[in-house]
Every structure is written in C-alpha cells, then in structure tokens.
Amino acid sequence: MNRIAGIINLDQEIDSMNELTYFRCMAAIPFGARYRMIDFTISNMINANIDSIAIFARKKYRSLLDHLEQGKAWDLDRQHGGLFILPPDWNDPTDISKGELQHFHNHIDFIHRVNADYIVVSGSQHICNIDLQAVLEEHIETKADVTVIYKHMKQLDSEHHYTKKLTVDENNRVVEIDYARENPHVYMNMYIMKKTALLKFIELSIEKGYTNLFKEAIKPNLSSLHVHAYQYKGAHAFIHSVESYYRNSMRLLDDNFYDCLFQTEAPIRTKLKNEAPATYSENAHVERSMVANGCHISGDVKNSVLFRSVKVGEGASIEDSIIMQRCEIAPDAVLKHVILDKECTISSGQVLIGTKENPFVVAKRQKL
C-alpha cells in the first residue's frame, strides 16, 4: 500500500480578512457554525488514511494551537506520526533559505523521517471534501511527476482573480499556469508528488535561492515535467476576503451545497465541545438558519449562521448574518448583513446593518 504524508503550508496565505484576522491566521477562522477553515484540510487528509501531518505556520498561530491541541479530534495524538505544528527555526545560523522554502529547509527532517512514499501539500483557503486517495491513484496511474488539483468553476467570482488558473491539454497535462481572469480552471493550491522527488525539488530550489517551491521550481518547468491536472468535482469554496467569506458562509444554508460538503461518507471533523443542545423560548422564531449547540434563542433568526453558545434576547432580530461563538445579542437589537467575531456583546436596541457586498464586521470581544 502506498502511504501518504501531509504538509499544510500556511506560509503563503495572506491575512486579508481585516477584523477576522486581527488575532488569528486565515486557517483558524471559524466557518460553518462549528468548524475552523483548517478542519477541512486536515479532515481530507485523515479520510485518506494520512496519519502524519505537518503544519507550516509563521505568524498569529496562537488561536490555531488552541484549536488543534495535540490533534485528538482527528485521531492524531499518537506515538508514531501524528500532528506537527512547525514554525520556522529563526536560530539556525546556517539557514540561507527564504520564503516558504525556509519551512521546507528547517523541517526537512520531517520529510526524511516520515513513513510515506508520497507527500500531499495543501493550503487551507480552499474549502472542500476531496478524496485524496483517488488523487493518488490517478497520480500513480498517469506516472506524473506532480499532480495538481483544480476546480472547474461554472461561475468565476471576485476572489478567483487572486487564484492561479490551469490550462490543460486533452490528456489533462498542465501546459500553462497563470492568473487569466476568464480561465475557469481554478488551481486549489494542492499538489502531490513522490517524497524522493519533493526532496530533490527542495534541494535544487534552495541552491538556486528560490523562495517559493511551486512558483519557481514547478511552474517554469512545465515543458520538462509531467504535471498532471486532477479535476475535483465536489462542493468548493475559496475564502480570500471578508466578502467571499460572507457569501460562501451563506451558501451553507443551501441544502444541496451543505449536503455535498458535509453529508458524505467522509466526515469533516473538528474540536469537540461538550455543550447542551440549542434551546428556544416560546417567542423564538428561526427560519433557514444554522444554529450550533449551546445557543439560547429568544428572538428572531433568519438566513443566518450561529456558532456555539450564542444568546439572542427577546425581540432581537438577526437576519443574513454570521454570529460567532459566545456572542450575546441583547433584547430588541437588530442585525442585518453582520459578522460578529467571538464573544461580542450587542446592547439592547442597537442597530447594525451592512450589505451583502460589504457586511458590517465587528472584531473579537467588542461591546457595542
């Protein structure tokens, strides 16, 4: 059996979410009432029987550490293999590597020692539920040097302007990688290759003074490498901005999208919280919303996503909004097109209104 190890590379993910990334990296942003963005990447790896996962983190990863702990929620708290959260080693006087290659250089021992024949490298901004074993099988069958994963988009949104696009031939071989706005083949920042090949790429890249393994060692060599394109056909969301986060969170209220992402044989796992089920008073009215456990609802909630332990007072109205964990909405407050980060308090009678294109965002632990 061919074994795979995983690397989740957060180094190239820019904190572009304003208030939502003041205190955390992109991977730690809450999503879908009870998850964090990184949960999807880790779950995809675990569902492919990957039991050794390294996370390359550089900054604002305290929240990530708090969420992941020892990896118990994903069965990664084990003696052999497991979860490794790896910041770069700033104290190595011999280190001449730069950019993301500093991670690959500083943690080359992980790649050398891991019991795997193949390595899958992924970011955390592409929300999906992908069968990585199927990707590996196609990679081996096509005898590719590298297999990259893409999504054919029926409609390109504004966030896709910031993603690489793939041009593929009739044999699904990648012939060009660029940022062409009209190209619907969105590269999902995931690729797989043999461990031995990855080690050679790393060594060559550091010798040449590169900063980005994919951009400088793989992309310019498409003519000499066999880079195969694997098309992912499941539910997908790319989170790059507050607007894209809001819009894709609202998509979770669509049954088809939700079922394709969550109601499969491959579960998305997250850190467990032992809280009571949500409770509703006699005057509560909830319509087309996701409400996590621990919530207490006494007001009106419509087309919204409520994370764990949110309290909604009597007469309060929440519509088209995202309310993160442990927020308190006092009686008669009105929220529409709003994103509240964790532990915010909204006073009685307060009115907060944004738009779909520009939701009103309140940073963590604010009182209004």
Image (tube, grey):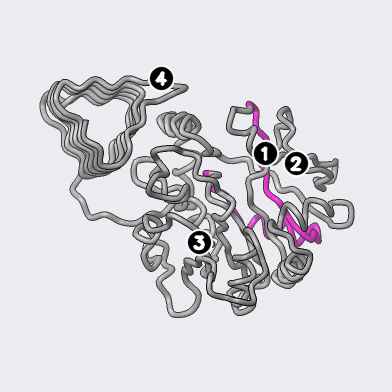
Q: Quadrant of the N terminus?
A: bottom right
Mark 3 and mark 1 in contact? Answer it, CB < 8 Å.
Answer: no
Image mark count? 4
Instruction: Kindly tell me whether residue 71 is visible in this rendering.
Output: yes
As helix, strand or loop, the secondary structure at mark 3 comes to helix
Between marks 4 and 3, how big is the CA–CA gap?
Answer: 38 Å
Question: On residue 186, which mark appears?
Answer: 1
Where 156 sits versus 226, above or below? above
- Tag 4: residue type? Thr
For residue 247, side relative to residue 315 (left or right): right
Q: Nearer the viewer, residue 268 or 104?
A: 104
Question: On residue 166, which mark appears?
Answer: 2
Magenta run includes residue 147 = yes
Instruction: Kindly tell me whether residue 128 is visible in this rendering.
Output: no
As helix, strand or loop, the secondary structure at mark 1 comes to strand
Q: Which residues are magenta?
A: 127-155
Residue in the image at 52% along x and 44% along y = 127
- Tag 1: residue type? Val
Name the residue carrying label 4: 355
Name the residue carrying label 3: 46
Between marks 3 and 2, how big is the CA–CA gap?
Answer: 27 Å
* Residue 298 quadrant: top left
